[in-house]
Image (tube, grey):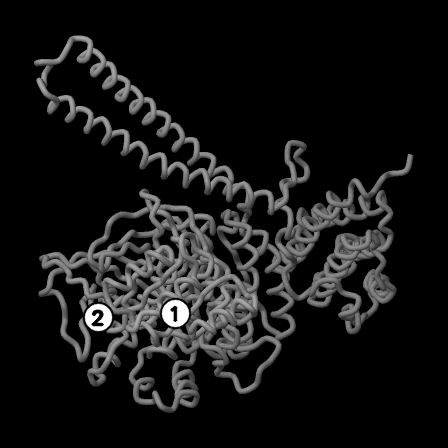
Amino acid sequence: MTVDRDAFIDNYLDELKENMLLIDSGILTLKKNPEDENELARLLRTLHTIKGSSRMLKFNHIEKIVHGLENVFKGVKEGKYSITRDLIRLVFITTDYLQIGAGKIKESKSDELPMENLLDVFEKACSGESYSLDGLKLTSKEQVTDSHSSPDPVGKDDVAGTTSDSETIRIKVSKTEKISKLLNNLIIKQFQLKRENDVLHNLEQEFRALMSTAPGGDNGGKSPNYAKKESKCLKGIQQLRKDFYLDLALLERDTFELQEEILSLSMMPLDLIIGPLNKMVEETAMSLDKEIDFSVTGSDVMLDKIILEKLNDPIIHLVRNSIDHGIEMPREREAKGKNSIGRLEMNCYLEGGNIIIRIKDDGKGLDYDRIRERAIELNPAQEEDIRSMDETALNTFLFTSGFSTKEKVQELSGRGVGLDIVRYNIGNIKGKIALCSEKDKGTEFVLTLPLSLATVEGFFILCANEKFLIPSTFVKEVLIINEEQKLNLVNSKAIKLRDKIIPLYDLKAILDKEVPREKSDKIFVMIVESLNEMVGMVVDSIIQYASLIYKPLPPNLNKLKPIQGIVFDESYNIINILYIPEIMNRFSKIQHIAASAEGPSYAEKYILVVDDSYTTRKIEQSILELENYNVVTANDGIDGLEKLGEQHFDLIVTDINMPRMDGLAFVENLRQQDEYGQTPVIVVSSVSDPEIKKKFASKGANSFIVKSDFDRGNLIYEVRNLIG
């Protein structure tokens, strides 16, 4: 009976992928210990397994390639020749062919490859003849994937289980995402039920008060039948509240367990992207004539599949930089008294709900003198400041776009080229990156990442009567100080923490709200960190630490810098998550603002935001307030007209489709008032119909922003153009 290979292809490819990793790791083990007979036997068994399954499914090209490599290692086993660099390169080239063949099978169910030259090299190697590896690499037209980079750790559409387990199923990622959205809705409903539980509690209290204040209280003057009904009603309310409370507690427990299980569906081991690095490190080192001892610990840590995919490129970039630019050539190392073999370590572990990845080399370290001079070349106007910077401050230039200390850009570029992309990609997965370096001792990059993008942990804080969430990833410490502990610096304040001077900034200075802070002996300070730089952020109070469901900003607002996303608190209020790197960037500008001559500030300008969507109102309000404008909101046109009568506004932002009175009618009524005949109006809507735009323009609207283009037609840009 002919085997229906279509039914087995997925399992075959999964097994092939695992076996390719075993081949790559096996040859590297034999490089370190050529006498390891167990590893050699394991490698031969792996090759035999691939050959047998390929023969059964009639993938003849892969079968012949693996058979050729198997014969080469039989020669190693028989002692005909030893493990050499050329042999290691030949193994890597072979697994590249297998990877490309796997890609072709997935696309067209054919493994056809141009393998004649490769088979010829196998024959020469087996005979002990000299052979050349030049020209064996397949051309770009023949490749399905870039063999120089790690393969996709997981399929884009599937979350795969262990294929050998009959109880394991394969499910679409889109399915898990849909389940997660439904779970989010369930959690939101749970918040609402909590509020209803509070309503029941208040109802019971009010009923008790009503009983005690009724005419003839304490049964005086009441008929026995009436008093009996009152008592029965109270007992009913009490029983209802008790049952409701118990059911809600069970719902919370089950929802939490369900959340944990759903999140685990998309969790995968870090080894999926770190495993293939062994081959990449060896190939890169050989291309540079260097020897690298690469070690990894903790790669079995589980994290979100989306984080895993986006982490692949940054890790490859940092590892290549360490090999190329960090670790010296063997002769240079020996001249410094170092081992000629460079050390590259990657340590992964869990800490405080985050995963920490440390990539450390024992190379020459960063040349801070060269970094300083290059920074001055690119920023001549800041020369005085740059010359006074310490090494930690200079590190920030390495993460600036286009910054490099190398004169020539190579395929394996120096530190700096691309580090801005690394920082951007790490920021996209709610992580942070830091580095430290010491001359002739090496450089270490530290990545701090959440385990999942579905949740966020952090501190609820209060500032200027508004609640925010500060992600714990960026929080180093939480302090309570008094006024005497502040240090007076030029144009700024600071505190001393363990012999380190840390600048102190008030978050309210960015929000710029005219809300006086209550006098207190306690000053709440959050020590936050980004790119090795720490500042103290003063807030009104620190409410609590929480782990919550993370909600990204709508697509049209996802490039807003100060806001990372939103969460719902226990009262189902929308709370903005502050993006600390951008907040710290704005703190750095405060000194210049304080030193400048007094003049009109944005805080003197009042803006009315009219939109029927609570979420949109809150987001636009936060955007404008973080840019130092005073903002009042209204939920439709009628509410907006009422707010216009309460105070004067310098600018109006309105939606189109709203209940009771839409945006067009609102603008018409607005222009009929003498006070608002010329007040600038910005329309922000998902409607893009040119005729609608013309109607608003005819009624006096000054600007029209389509929500889908919000990141390009920046709201702040339009506001500043109209009112400064």
Image-quadrant location for residue 244: top left
Q: Is residue 124 above or below residue 190?
A: below
Residues at marks 1 and 2, CA–CA distance in whole angstroms: 19 Å
| Residue 278 in picture, x, y percent from top left | 60, 59
Horizontal side of residue 512 vs 287, given as left or right: left
Query: Residue at point 63% right, 44% down?
Result: 172
| Residue 230 in picture, x, y percent from top left | 21, 16
Work out which quarter of the rendered image holds the N terminus and state it. Answer: top right
Q: Amino acid at mark 2?
A: Ile
Can residue 173 be seen in the rendering of this structure? yes
Image mark count: 2
Q: Disc 2 designates what residue?
A: 501
Which sits earlier in the primary sequence, circle 1 or circle 2? Answer: 1
Q: Is residue 118 above or below residue 290?
A: above
Callout 1 environment at 10 Å: few (<14), some (14 to 19), or many (20+)? Answer: some
Query: Residue at point 37% right, 58% down?
Result: 637
| Residue 291 in picture, x, y percent from top left | 58, 69
Residue at the right extreme? 1
Image-quadrant location for residue 412: bottom right
Q: Disc 1 designates what residue?
A: 436
Q: Amino acid at mark 1?
A: Cys
